[in-house]
Amino acid sequence: PERLVIINESHLHAGHHHSGSDHHGAFDGTGETHFRVRIVSPSFAGMSRIERHRAVNELLADELKAGVHALAIEPAAPGEQTPW
């Protein structure tokens, strides 16, 4: 990527608890579990928003299985306007 920013937003979710009944497993509100990824890559040119999200999710599949509870993805191709 031309630009990659990873923001740990876990502190915003401290105290949120989930039982593990969903496919993400248990979440006790602690640890590094919530992230925002801002990424600019030429690979995203011509891709729809959902295709971009799928590409990022595929690359981060192991991390998502290993305890990341939430991932906000903000993808862009070079030259696209971003609020960040």
Image: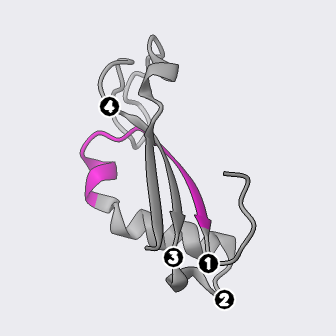
Write the residue at 35% across / 41% down.
68
Was residue 40 drawn as part of the magenta stretch in this picture?
no
Instruction: Answer few, some or many: residues within 10 Å of disc 3's Cα (few below 14, many 20 plus, some between 14 and 19).
Output: some
Asked if 1 appears above or below 67 in the picture, the reply is below
Residue receiving disc 4: 32
State if disc 3 and disc 2 touch (CB < 8 Å). Answer: no
Instruction: Answer few, some or many: residues within 10 Å of disc 2's Cα (few below 14, many 20 plus, some between 14 and 19).
Output: few
State if disc 4 and disc 2 touch (CB < 8 Å). Answer: no
State if disc 3 and disc 1 touch (CB < 8 Å). Answer: yes
Between disc 3 and disc 4, the foreground one is 3
Q: Is residue 60 left or right of residue 14?
A: left
Between disc 4 and disc 1, the foreground one is 1
Q: Earlier in the sequence, mark 2 or mark 4?
A: 4
Kind of residue at disc 4: Glu
How far, Cα to Cα, is label 1 from label 3?
6 Å
Residue receiving disc 2: 46
Residue 3: horizontal and vertical position, in percent?
Answer: 48, 65
Asked if 21 appears above or below 84 in the picture, the reply is above
Q: Is residue 29 left or right of residue 67?
A: right
In the figure, residue 49 lies in which quadrant? bottom right
State if disc 1 and disc 2 touch (CB < 8 Å). Answer: no
Asked if 18 appears above or below 45 in the picture, the reply is above
Q: Earlier in the sequence, mark 2 or mark 3?
A: 3
In this rendered view, identify the residue nearer to me: 37 or 18. Answer: 37
Kind of residue at disc 2: Gly
Residue receiving disc 1: 78
**What is the magenta range?**
62-75
Residue 44: horizontal and vertical position, in percent?
Answer: 57, 80
Residue receiving disc 3: 41
